[in-house]
């Protein structure tokens, strides 16, 4: 399940779900069936069965919220430092062009904080903190329109292969010579 804030449930939603589980615990104590509890709480029978198993093993305390599944590896202070590094631009970190890619951000995090992130982990970290994918509004200054036009005229037609054969073929793949 994906969440709009980029990771886990909000505190209010965690509280709501915990209350549901505790209501289920009261129903377990009364001996109600899992299907009845699922219908009353508008949940799945499988979830109620998992809750019942936890309740059997540890009582109502086992159904309390455990908090977020994982904490961010970069603290707020470290992320502010990362933003300052990103604001300096890619050239300040040794790249020739002015594009931040996820792999470059990953490299900066590794160099600056000695942490290893995956590419998707970097994306989630940035999205969670309000960053988004950006596409340049204008074309690059280095763009050579004449070279692009020449490529489209000369190279692209050779690269683009016609998908239909010139002569009539067979509709059967297994018997290509059949009439």
Image: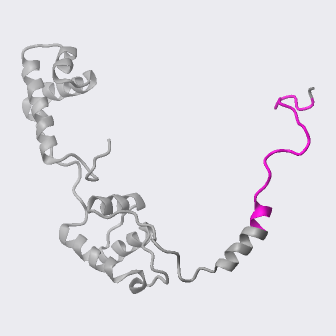
Tell me where the magenta segment starts and ends, as one range: 155-177
Quarter the C terminus occupies: top right
Quarter the N terminus occupies: top left
Helix, strand or loop: magenta stretch: loop
> Against 179, is 80 above or below?
below
> Against 123, is 45 above or below?
above
Which residue does the image show at 49% across and 84% down from the upper left?
Answer: 96
Residue 126 in percent (x, y) is at 32, 63
Give the image quarter of residue 127.
bottom left
**As drawn, is 65 to the left or to the right of 159?**
left
Check residue 156 for magenta coloring. yes
Residue 43 in percent (x, y) is at 22, 25
**As drawn, is 39 to the left or to the right of 59?**
right
Which residue does the image show at 93% across and 31% down from the upper left?
Answer: 177
Residue 134 in percent (x, y) is at 41, 66
Which residue does the image show at 21% across and 56% down from the upper left?
Answer: 71
**As drawn, is 83 to the left or to the right of 139?**
left
């Amino acid at each position: 399940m994906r969440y709009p804030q980029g990771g886990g449930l909000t505190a209010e939603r965690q509280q709501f779900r915990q209350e549901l589980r505790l209501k289920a615990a009261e129903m377990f104590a009364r001996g109600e069936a899992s299907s009845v509890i699922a219908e009353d709480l508008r949940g799945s029978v499988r979830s109620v069965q998992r809750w019942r198993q936890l309740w059997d093993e540890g009582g109502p305390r086992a159904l309390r919220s455990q908090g977020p599944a994982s904490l961010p590896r970069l603290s707020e202070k470290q992320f502010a430092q990362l933003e300052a590094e990103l604001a300096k631009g890619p050239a300040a970190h040794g790249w020739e062009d002015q594009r931040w890619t996820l792999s470059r951000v990953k490299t900066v995090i590794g160099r600056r904080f000695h942490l290893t992130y995956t590419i998707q982990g970097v994306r989630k970290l940035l999205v969670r903190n309000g960053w988004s994918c950006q596409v340049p509004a204008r074309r690059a200054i280095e763009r050579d329109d004449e070279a692009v036009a020449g490529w489209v005229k000369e190279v692209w037609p050779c690269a683009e292969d016609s998908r239909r054969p010139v002569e009539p073929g067979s509709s059967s793949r297994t018997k290509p010579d059949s009439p």
